[in-house]
Image (tube, rainbow, N blue to C red):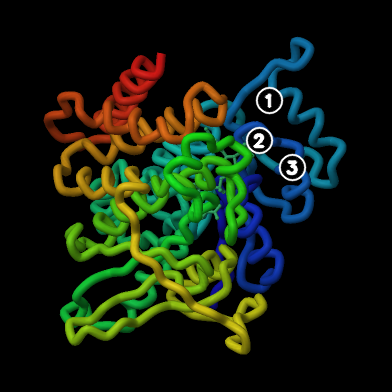
Amino acid sequence: MKIKRIIVAGSTGSIGSSTIDVIRKNPDLFKIAGLSCNTNWQKMFVQADEFLPEAVAVSVGFENDGVNSHKFLKQESRNYTFKDNIKIYVGTNALVDMVRETKADLVVNGVSGVSGLLVSFWTLMSGKDLALANKESIVMAGELLLDMAKKKEREILPIDSEHSAVFNLMRILDRSSIDEIVLTASGGALRDYTAEQLNNVTVADALRHPTWKMGKKITIDSASMANKGLEVIEANKLFSFSPEKLKVVIHPQSIVHSLIRTKDGMLYGQIGKPDMRLPIQNALTYPEIRDTGFSRLLLDDVTLEFRKIDFQKYRMLSLAYSVIEEGGVLPIVYNAANEVAVSMFIEEKIKFVDIPDVVEQCLSKNWQGKALSIEDIMDVDLRARKISEEYIR
Ligand SMILES: NC(=O)c1ccc[n+]([C@@H]2O[C@H](COP(=O)([O-])OP(=O)(O)OC[C@H]3O[C@@H](n4cnc5c(N)ncnc54)[C@H](OP(=O)(O)O)[C@@H]3O)[C@@H](O)[C@H]2O)c1
């Protein structure tokens, strides 16, 4: 395999750090071309010192004792071995500019939330493959991104473990033989809570994920099943399966990453450790499948359990199905309202059980029409955020 030049967008986060691990283990396969963070430039500079990329990006500009952030970061860089040799981008457009201007084969999009959308868009626009963890991109702009990938003859390689599993199973099974996709869900931190207990959930409770170690937003989404809701929408767009052919099942061990049922009723699954480095390595080495040195799941003492979903308990999941049924701009609204509700829950302004109320209220407004461009999509996103914020106030 020719050495791949990789930009890690969101390198300081959970997906970013796992990507760095994969690259660190395989210096003969990958070279880091760019790194990025929102504010955590200290962590990113340590990464830059180790991998010496061409460029780094910090999305939030700041003033430090009257010195602007670019000048400040330039001065700080002299304390590192890379000194002045790395191009530093700072400010709102920093990450997109870096993605557009830096020579690379592939961008890992590990940015959280709506800010990842422009990263996905400009990755493909600038002719690079997209290894996608930021599911919000596909939820908001699936059609547009898939069209763009086709036009530019670039790949969208899912990193979400469920979609990576389905993507790989679909490389083996003939599409015409597939009946349905079964996405597995750990059930998140609150899987065994009763409806009554859910009323009193704290932020710390919702952040205690049993199997995956992830960023805050996605961990709360796992507890409410909004994450699975976003993933069902993502699967609908990525793989073109209708909602009746997209099933979800609770699988507490997070070892079966997803399954495909063929028309003869048989189930085929992808089984492995719950470790995001595995789907990441899979996307980075695509189309090859390689041993990149991570430990394997041993089947000596493994129990697999599956449980039916309780749609009344997980309202965010049933809302996601209705969003797919109704289509139009509703996936954008679902994502935006959920992001607002989750940040309000983290700030302790609403209760955990209020999250689906906020989203349902916002979805019930008059959302006619289509969003065909990035500008239209961002406009719907902004309107949905305002409506959700007003509802919470
Ligand atoms: N974590 C997982 O296991 C996992 C699994 C599947 C899918 N995903 C998806 O992957 C994405 C990232 O999740 P995560 O858990 O890695 O999140 P995370 O740990 O919170 O990391 C987010 C990264 O994005 C950066 N960032 C945040 N806001 C930004 C903005 N406005 N502009 C530019 N950069 C920004 C952060 O920088 P700072 O460090 O400076 O804040 C950080 O590098 C999400 O879409 C999530 O749904 C994650």
Q: Earlier in the sequence, mark 2 or mark 1?
A: 1
Mark 3 is on which residue type? Lys
Q: Is residue 71 left or right of residue 361?
A: right
Kindly indicate the quadrant of the structure image that contains residue 211. bottom right
Image quadrant occupied by the C terminus? top left
Q: Earlier in the sequence, mark 2 or mark 3?
A: 3
The residue labelled by disc 3 is 43
Q: Residues within 10 Å of mark 2 (few under 14, many from 20)?
A: many
Ligand 1 - quadrant of the structure image: top right
Tell me: is circle 3 under 8 Å from ligand 1: yes
- Give the residue drawn at x 42%, y 59%: 129
Separation of marks 2 and 1 at Cα, in angstroms: 7 Å
Instruction: Report whether residue 101 is seen.
Output: no
Mark 2 is on which residue type? Ile
Q: Residues within 10 Å of mark 3 (few under 14, many from 20)?
A: few
Tell me: is circle 2 under 8 Å from ligand 1: no
- Give the residue drawn at x 29%, y 22%: 383
Labels 2 and 1 touching (C-beta < 8 A)? yes
The residue labelled by disc 1 is 70
Residue furthest bottom as drawn: 300
Image location of residue 314, percent across then percent down = 36, 48
- The image's mark for residue 88 is 2
Q: Nearer the viewer, residue 380 or 247?
A: 247
Mark 1 is on which residue type? His
Label 2: state its secondary structure: strand
Image quadrant occupied by the N terminus? bottom right
Q: Is residue 312 above or below residue 307?
A: above
Separation of marks 2 and 3 at Cα, in angstroms: 15 Å
Q: Is residue 166 above or below residue 211?
A: below
Separation of marks 1 and 3 at Cα, in angstroms: 17 Å
